[in-house]
Image: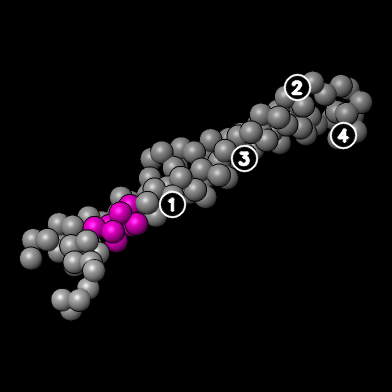
Amino acid sequence: MSDHSEYSERDVLREVSELEEKSATAARLFDIRRIIGGLFVIYGVIVTIAGLTDDDAAIDKAEGVNINLWTGLGMLLLGLFFLTWLKLRPMAPPPDATTGDEAKG
């Protein structure tokens, strides 16, 4: 690197590793499995409650099937599947950029 540079190589590596860490944290926070799972759980609870409170007219309209109850339970199970998947298989942690580069220098 040039002697006229304001930042040393170590400063640049530190800033890059901080940005990578922030990026990985944001990626874990907005993991699509968390969003899909959360939405399906919320809507599943709402539709299940609607199914539990359906009257006979609504059930007769669906040819004797309590469609809101079954759809709500299915959505709830799907949402729980996504959240369980997220818990069992989290995103891989970011590689540690400082161990390899600083060992050389």
Residue type highlighted by circle 3: Leu
Q: Image point 79% across, 21% down: which residue?
A: 53
Determine whether, in the image, residue 18 is placed left or right of residue 74.
left
Q: Closer to us: mark 2 or mark 1?
A: 1
Q: Quadrant of the N terminus?
A: bottom left
Determine whether, in the image, residue 37 is placed left or right of residue 12.
right
Question: What residue is disc 1 on?
Answer: 27
Residue type highlighted by circle 1: Ala
Question: What residue is disc 2 on?
Answer: 52
Identify the image quadrant of residue 66: top right
Per the image, label 4 sits on a secondary structure element best described as loop
Q: Residue furthest bottom?
A: 2
Q: Give above or below for 47 relative to 55.
A: below
Question: What residue is disc 4 on?
Answer: 63
Q: Image point 15% across, 57% down: which residue?
A: 99
Per the image, label 3 sits on a secondary structure element best described as helix
